[in-house]
């Protein structure tokens, strides 16, 4: 596959918001639920997107791109199935697919440049209510619905290079993009009034902002890698469209710190761990309504058994666990997410430790809880990597 | 050194295709999206209020005017009979049949089917079909058939004239048409929906010349005090083919043109709203939606007054009419479909171009005939929400200035001799505007 084809494929896939639908009831709180732009390998290992061996291609670990020595494209898709219940006894389910990561990397000068589109916040949800109004001719049933359709994405341009054989540095400049459309609709049903049109009140805002992410990773000996990154964002600005009555908004975003490490204590065995720190509490001042903002601090651990093979191809088996907070919740409650994960990798073509063509599958069984709401979910992540010499 | 790693499998990489296939398979997984719906009402922004406001005629409408003469009676496509109905209305139907078939196919003495163009007309009959849902009589009535004697034009003929076009106006020699009586028949609505008039061979031959524009039959009702609608008429002709003279073959000529003539002419209304008839009537009104509401008190108890009305807040805008009894001679005998449209240029009436129907129901707002007779006083809502919104915005969906006049008309015109009547301004049942408003806060960011 030619590099031009890789770029074309990425363009055709769309640079717009990458979230096609929602993942959680907590999308209704504050600015929504973060979507991590992780591949299937990181998901299977419970990793938070940093410090894994080999080359990886995630916005959370900008230095890792330096180890991509060929033109590479990666894509990830993520269907999920969620069952929820509330303390009030309400329950239900929903499902959907999203595409949290698209990217290409290309060797340039003495390093590797990259373009990535990653998801950042998912804001899609609906709310419904029914009632009635009394007109002269009698009562008319009403159905109110509120539909919020939006997400925030991050378009990143990065450059990374090796310093010697063991240390990699990377920096990424990102631009937040996306939009949200908030629509309130009241429809009428029944009654003697003819031609009762629905009432629609709608507002649309476009998001913009920038972020800079810097990272470093180092191989300490032949079996240990450590990595760290920090992301410094600007405020997230929401600009109302011309025909929107609602006002513009500006939201403080937190700095995000990540630390990860992986080790190979024995041949065919790899363990990894990662930490993530981000305090969203300052965002709470910019949000109206009964929403609480907290930290999303989290950790993840995992193990990979890489000696398994299928039809002569390497078939690593992975397990992991992760726990992190959700930035926004309802009322004064906090919300967390934790998940056990497992998965496999299928390396179809490799060069040394680099996978030139492969797919990674992760299955997570997790739980989100807070504010009297519990969600249990199955989440699959499938990512593919295709490289060109 | 990093840049010189070699691939372990060379340049043929079926793995790439497999990876793409896996990813594509994943793309269709869980494609049946189900959006999470928040639990409870807490995630709805401020709830709007839906209220109803009644606005009297003087505050939203003016310049009611009725215009008549739309369409031709022949466009109704059916006939009409009346005899001194309500003491005044007489109506007759005139029909011109099409040409007879040139040939028939018969079986000859050898058993073969052959076309035969040498036909001998030996007689026939005119069959008239009545609308069993649109008549006033409940007992048998006598209907007479006549043959027209002078040229007549279905498009323009009326009670006084056989032709009434711009350059050709010819009166009948006697009002109501020149015809020779061909006989009578009894129509009993309890027995069926048709009446049959025998016609002799001489008349059948006389009608065989399809270029003769004086051909035609006049159907009239002789029993006074009734009226009815005719669905049409056909001419059945009995013929003997030359190759099988022992066989009777019946051929049919359908009505090519049908119209009706009536007297007296309908006078323009002095007040009130008139819709329909044949030719049809339309009523035009100038309208304006109040941009600021200062009442009524029930409204201001819910919404702070004065309230600046926005188009998005109009859930419904309807003209509420109260039916009145039409002239007894022209009361409908079937339901009418009412329509409302915007008038692009009031000054150009009666020929002003009209906008599209403002109703969503293509059959129009149906009103039964009783509302214009003994059951007068029925309120009828004619919604025109989209025009009301345009009036508040000042422009229509295309950005053109919003029309400030609307016209009330029949959804199909002309459709019937009967017309609808409604109370006009200044009466107890004068039209009023009914607004259903939904007013809520603007949507804001979370």
Image: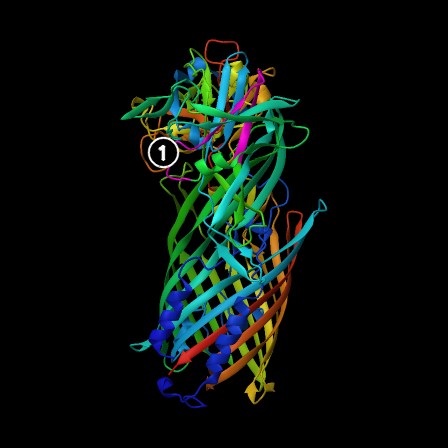
Give whichever of B185, A44 is nearer the camera: B185
A367 left or right, relative to B411: right
- Local secondary structure at mark 1: loop
Magenta region includes residue B370: no
Residue A105, by quadrant, is bottom left
Give whichever of A265, A137 is nearer the camera: A137
Q: What residue lies at 47% left-to-right and 53% top-to-bottom?
A: A151
Whether residue B270 is visible: yes
Q: What residue lies at 36% left-to-right and 33% top-to-bottom?
A: B396
Whether residue B417 is visible: no
Residue A11, by quadrant, is bottom left
Q: Dividing the image into 4 quarters, which one contains the N terminus of chain B?
A: bottom left
> Given the image, what chain letter belongs to the residue carrying mark 1?
B
Q: What residue lies at 44% left-to-right and 48% top-to-bottom?
A: A252
Magenta region includes residue B213: yes
- Above or below, A103 against A333 in this view is below
Percent of width and height locating residue A116: 40, 66
Percent of width and height locating residue A81: 62, 60
The stretch in magenta equals B209-233
Look at mark 1 in the image and give the residue it sits on: B396
State how many labels appear: 1
Give whichever of B268, B94 is nearer the camera: B94
- Above or below, B63 against B198 in this view is above
Q: What residue lies at 41% left-to-right and 79% top-to-bottom?
A: A387
* Residue positioned most to the right: A89
A189 left or right, relative to A173: right
Percent of width and height locating residue A109: 29, 77
């Amino acid at each position: 596959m030619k590099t031009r084809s890789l770029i074309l494929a990425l363009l055709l896939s769309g640079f717009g918001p990458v979230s096609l639908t929602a993942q959680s009831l907590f999308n209704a709180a504050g600015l929504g639920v973060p979507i991590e732009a992780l591949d299937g390998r990181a998901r299977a290992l419970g990793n938070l997107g940093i410090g894994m061996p080999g080359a990886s291609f995630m916005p959370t670990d900008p230095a890792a791109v330096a180890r991509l020595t060929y033109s590479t494209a990666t894509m990830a898709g993520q269907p999920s199935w969620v069952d929820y219940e509330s303390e009030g006894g309400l329950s239900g389910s929903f499902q959907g697919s999203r595409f949290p990561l698209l990217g290409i990397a290309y060797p340039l000068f003495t390093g590797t440049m990259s373009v990535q589109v990653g998801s950042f916040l998912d804001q899609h949800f609906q709310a419904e209510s029914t009632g009635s109004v009394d007109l002269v001719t009698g009562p008319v049933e009403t159905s109110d619905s509120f539909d919020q359709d939006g997400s925030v994405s991050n378009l990143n341009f990065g450059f990374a290079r090796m310093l010697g054989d063991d240390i990699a540095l990377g920096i990424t400049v990102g631009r937040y993009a996306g939009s949200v459309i908030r629509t309130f609709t009241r429809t009428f049903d029944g009654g003697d009034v003819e031609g009762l049109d629905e009432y629609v009140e709608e507002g649309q805002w476009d998001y913009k902002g920038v972020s800079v992410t810097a990272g470093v990773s180092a191989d300490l000996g032949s079996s240990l890698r450590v990595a760290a990154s920090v992301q410094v964002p600007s405020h997230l600005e929401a600009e109302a469209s011309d025909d929107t009555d609602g006002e513009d908004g500006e939201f403080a975003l937190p700095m995000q710190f990540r630390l990860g490490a992986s080790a190979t204590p024995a041949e065919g065995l790899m363990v990894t761990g990662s930490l993530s720190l981000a305090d969203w509490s300052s965002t709470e001042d910019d949000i109206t309504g009964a929403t609480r903002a907290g930290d999303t601090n989290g950790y993840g651990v995992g193990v990979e058994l890489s000696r398994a093979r299928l039809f002569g191809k390497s078939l690593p088996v992975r397990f992991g666990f992760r726990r992190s907070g959700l930035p926004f919740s309802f009322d004064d409650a906090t919300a967390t997410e934790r998940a056990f994960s497992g998965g496999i990798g299928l390396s179809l073509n490799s060069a040394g430790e680099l996978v030139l063509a492969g797919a990674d599958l992760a299955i997570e069984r997790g739980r989100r809880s807070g504010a009297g709401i519990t969600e249990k979910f199955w989440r699959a992540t499938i990512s593919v990597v295709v490289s060109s010499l | 050194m990093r840049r010189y790693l070699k691939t372990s499998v060379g340049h043929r990489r079926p793995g790439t295709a497999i990876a793409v296939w896996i990813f594509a398979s994943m793309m269709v997984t869980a494609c049946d999206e189900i959006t999470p719906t928040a639990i409870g009402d807490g995630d709805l922004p401020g709830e709007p209020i839906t209220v109803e406001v009644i606005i009297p005629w003087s505050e939203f409408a003016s310049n009611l005017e009725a215009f008549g003469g739309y369409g031709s009676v022949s466009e109704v496509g059916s006939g009409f009979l009346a005899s001194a109905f309500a003491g005044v209305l007489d109506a007759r139907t005139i029909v011109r049949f099409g040409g007879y078939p040139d040939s028939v196919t018969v079986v000859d003495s050898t058993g073969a089917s052959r076309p035969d163009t040498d036909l001998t007309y030996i007689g026939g009959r005119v069959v008239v079909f009545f609308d069993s849902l649109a008549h006033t009589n409940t007992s048998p009535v006598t209907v007479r058939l006549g043959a027209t004697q002078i040229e007549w034009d279905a498009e323009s003929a009326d009670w006084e004239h056989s032709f009434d076009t711009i350059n050709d106006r010819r009166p009948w020699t006697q009002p109501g048409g020149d015809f020779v009586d061909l006989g009578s028949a009894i129509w009993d609505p309890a027995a069926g929906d048709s009446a049959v008039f025998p016609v002799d061979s001489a008349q059948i031959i006389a009608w065989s010349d399809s270029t003769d524009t004086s051909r035609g039959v006049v159907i009239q009702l002789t029993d006074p005090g009734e009226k009815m609608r005719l669905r049409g008429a056909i001419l059945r002709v009995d013929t003997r083919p030359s190759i099988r003279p022992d066989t009777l073959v019946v051929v049919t000529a359908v009505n090519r043109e049908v119209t009706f003539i009536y007297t007296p002419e309908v006078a323009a209304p002095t007040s009130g709203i008139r819709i329909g008839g044949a030719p049809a009537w339309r009523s035009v009104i100038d309208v304006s939606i109040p941009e600021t509401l200062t009442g009524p008190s029930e409204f201001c108890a819910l919404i702070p007054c004065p309230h600046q009305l926005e188009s998005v807040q109009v859930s419904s805008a309807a003209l509420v009419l109260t039916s009145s009894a039409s002239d007894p001679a022209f009361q409908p005998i079937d339901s009418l479909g009412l329509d409302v449209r915007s008038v692009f240029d009031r000054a150009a009436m009666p020929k002003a171009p009209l906008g599209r129907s403002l109703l969503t129901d293509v059959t129009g707002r149906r009103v039964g005939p009783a509302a214009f007779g003994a059951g007068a006083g029925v309120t009828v809502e004619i919604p025109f929400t989209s025009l009301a919104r345009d009036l508040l915005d000042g422009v229509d969906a295309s950005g053109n200035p919003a029309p400030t006049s609307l016209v009330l008309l029949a959804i199909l015109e002309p459709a019937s001799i009967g017309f609808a009547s409604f109370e006009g301004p200044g009466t107890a049942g004068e039209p009023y505007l009914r607004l259903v408003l939904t007013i809520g806060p603007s949507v804001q960011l979370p």
